[in-house]
Amino acid sequence: MSRTTFDLLVVGDANPDVIVSGSPRHPEFGQREQLVPAAGLVLGGSGAITAYGAARLGLRTAFVGRVGDDPAGAFVLDALRAGGVDVSACVVDPAVPTAMTVALVDGDDRAILTAPGCLDRLGAADVPPGLLERAAHEVVSSYFLQPLLAAGLFVLFGLARAAGASTSLDTNDDPAGRWAGLEDVLPVTDVLLPNEPEALAIARATTLEQAVRELADRGTLPVVKRGERGAVAFADGELVEIPAPPATVVDAVGAGDSFDAGLLAALLRGRPLRQAMTVAVACGTLSTRAAGGTAAQPTWEEATA
């Protein structure tokens, strides 16, 4: 009998996103009012978007994060529940507000403004040991936004592996630009999920091939997201490249998180790496069909059509 209750345990950030589409590159100050084509309030946070996408792909998914005891926190938890994600282990923090993000979107590019709220209060101790023991895979998002979680991640991943789970990490951006602290974590990370600039920064490399080789030498499987150019990985001494299909991008917010969900869903279904990357690229691409990170996330049938 399987020990697992959940295919995927996601630990990380969750917040409402205010998506402003068609934003000017340089908004005018001086109380100037500028009109934009559209704006929306949607579920945000790399971890939350990954969890929502994984559930839509058919994975039994649990999410652990922190939200404030406020309307923004209730919005986040309600949205995740509505998407089929178990949030029973999430922490509602009465002392600090929920994080909030404003994304100014211009085509497939965006500027991201985040008020961290309670993000930096999430720690490894917030993850119930019993939940770790019941998950087949654990993925952590936004390493650099959550210093307490980052400090305990080596131990957390060690516990997950001891319980028989595999592990993955999407660091996301480092606002401080230091890209430090991963030396001990990468050897206990089965899959590393950076985008191309993040991979170059983590590896301190000048080319992508150099970066993925360097990261693989540190004991992890690097799978690097390249947007409209698809994805690259380095495994078993081989460079694996998957192109992206043509797409008309409405909004690329959360596309990398949808890629993560697709890759993990395929790997957990036993698909080989190249096929799993193809599914992941499809998930990332399909997610750009609508504004926000979750509105256009595909089902398994759509992603594998």
Image (tube, rainbow, N blue to C red):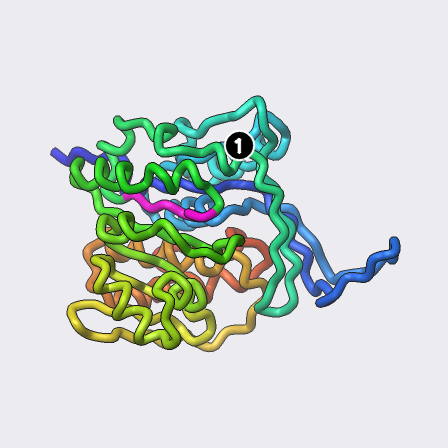
- Mark 1, residues whose alpha carbon is within 10 Å: few (<14), some, or many (≥20)? many
Above or below for 60 versus 301 = above
Nearer to us in this view, 42 or 96: 96
| Residue name at image x 48 percent, y 60 percent | 255
Per the image, label 1 sits on a secondary structure element best described as strand
Q: At x 28% / y 37%, what residue is drawn?
A: 156
Q: Which residue, as the protein is rendered here, is positioned at the far left? A: 1
Q: Nearer the viewer, residue 206 or 58?
A: 206
Report if residue 198 lies within the magenta region: no
Q: In the rendered view, tell whether residue 175 sits above or below residue 73.
A: below
- Judging depth in this view, the residue of 80 and 30 nearest the camera is 30
Relative to 207, is 191 on the left or the right? left
Kind of residue at disc 1: Val
Q: Where is residue 50 drawn, in percent x and y?
A: 42, 49
Q: Which residue lies at the image location 21% right of the left edge and 60% below the top edge?
A: 271
Compared across the picture, whether 25 is left or right of 128 comes to right
Where is residue 33? Give x, y as percent: 86, 57
Task: Let me know if residue 143 appears in the view.
Answer: yes
Q: Which residues are magenta?
A: 138-144
Residue at image point 64% right, 62% down: 105
Q: Quadrant of the C terminus?
A: bottom left
- List the residue tagged with mark 1: 67
Task: Please tell me in which quadrant of the rendered image residue 24 appears.
Answer: bottom right
* 236 on left or right of 203: left
